[in-house]
Amino acid sequence: MLSSAEDTATTVQIISTALTLRYGPRVVALAFNLDLSPSDIKLGLIDIGSLVEYGEYDFLNILHASLSDFLFDESRSQELYIDRRSIHTRSVQTLLREYLKPHGAKRFIITLYHTETYY
């Protein structure tokens, strides 16, 4: 169960970012986006093995299709609720911060897909 995770806030951020940003989700990409190490991602998910698994090439597989419905519905998830707009905002901030670093030689191409219209 998600609420049984040792660090629920980090665990919810990892899963909701993986569900929102449609780039894999590879552990390395999640780590970059959340400013964590890949081992932090794996540790953050260790308590919820019934909800996620690691696939081939370190892809994170969400095992329950209804998990996204739950996390993105404030009336159901309450304190675990995550607003997708905040995830998109954080992702853009992370990319801009990396791009503006003095060593700016690194180039990151990440496509963000909006899954719904915000009003």
Image: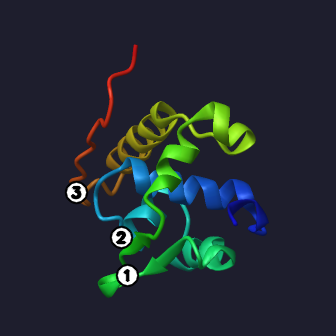
In the figure, is residue 39 to the left or right of 91? right
Which circle, 2 or 3, is nearer the viewer?
A: 2
Amino acid type, label 1: Asp
Residue under the point 56% across and 80% down: 39
Give the structural element (helix, strand or loop) at label 3.
Answer: loop
Q: Position of residue 41 (x, y in %)?
A: 56, 71
Q: Which residue is mark 1?
A: 58
**Residue at point 52% right, 55% down?**
67
Figure quadrant of residue 12: bottom right
The tag on residue 107 is 3
Residue 60 vs 102, above or below: the answer is: below
Instruction: Tell me the kind of residue under disc 3.
Output: Arg
Is 3 on the left-hand or right-hand side of 89?
right
* Crowd around label 3: few <14 · some 14–19 · many ≥20 (10 Å): few
Which circle's residue, 1 or 3, is located before the other in the chain?
Answer: 1
Residue appearing at x 35%, y 65% in the figure: 25
| Percent coordinates x, y for residue 46 in the rendering | 64, 79
Where is residue 92? Give x, y as percent: 38, 39
